Image (spheres, helix red, strand yellow):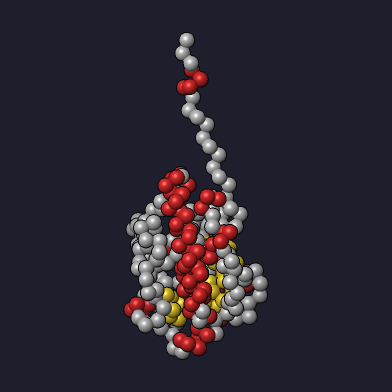
Amino acid sequence: MSDHFHDHPPLAAEPPPDCPRCQKPEPLCICDSVTPLESRLGLLILQHPQEQDRALGTARLAAQHFQNAVVKVGLSWPSLAKALGRPVDDPSRWAILYLGSAKAAELDPESEVVALTRKGEVAENQRAILKSIEGVILLDGTWSQAKALWWRNPWMLKCQRVILGPRRPSRYGQLRREPRSDGLSTIEAAGLLMAALERRPEIAATLEASFERMLARYREVEKAHPELTPRPKPRAKPGWRRRKRRV
């Protein structure tokens, strides 16, 4: 008589729980290594609801480095105050990072942070503008998702738009290829922008070190548990989209 009990496949192991802070599967979590920094600036990260890359995403990890950081998931909010959850005296004192088609390397190759006018030109009095900033807004998602957030929230035009000209490409490397050389992860962008505005290079160094630890942990887990580390699709270049037929 054949032993039919061995014909059944083994039961699948339960997936590990997610960390409540970074929302990554616990094997990928490095939250215990994060110590919040003191910062005079507020930080608001607006995440597109379809930004699903939990394994390599950095928004919530970036926010943990600052005691006055807020992460909101959604498509639109009536105002900066509603998104932030508290009153805002002057939205123009909040810097919003939105690259769009602008490139710092072409507009101001000497600067890592460039303030723009509403027309997308380099603003006058860069030093005075950047010195007056009280908070930073980052859009977390793909290029097209960031564009959707930008267009769905008209109040963002009241904020001070800035772009970045990083000296080196993202540390993602081959793990997630950015479509532009100035495309950074959210944690890298937060580190570069907050450090420049506060003139404290240690902010960037701290966030970059956390990002390096996160990537190292990802690579370790990728070898042992590839099911927890799906590789994201390459990000489409900004401005690219399929042609839609007119009805």
Q: Is residue 73 or residue 184 the one in the foreground?
A: 184
Q: Is residue 118 among the parts visible in the rendering? A: no
Residue lying at 58% horizontally and 47% vertically, measured from the top left: 17
Residue 60 x/y as whole percent: 55, 61
Residue lying at 37% horizontally and 74% vertically, measured from the top left: 167
- Give the farthest residue toward the top: 1
Residue 213 x/y as whole percent: 48, 60
86 w.r.t. 242: above or below: below
228 w.r.t. 167: above or below: above
User: In the figure, residue 29 lies in which quadrant?
Assistant: bottom right
Q: Is residue 55 or residue 107 the one in the foreground?
A: 55
Q: Is residue 85 rendered to the left or right of residue 187?
A: right
- Give the farthest residue toward the right: 86
Q: Quadrant of the C terminus?
A: bottom left
Residue lying at 46% horizontally and 74% vertically, measured from the top left: 192
Residue 40 x/y as whole percent: 60, 78
User: In the figure, residue 23 lies in which quadrant?
Assistant: bottom right
Disc count in the image? Answer: 0
Residue lying at 50% horizontally and 85% vertically, measured from the top left: 129
Q: Is residue 108 or residue 49 the one in the foreground?
A: 108
User: In the figure, residue 86 lies in which quadrant?
Assistant: bottom right
Q: Is residue 70 rendered to the left or right of residue 53?
A: right
Q: Is residue 2 among the parts visible in the rendering? A: yes
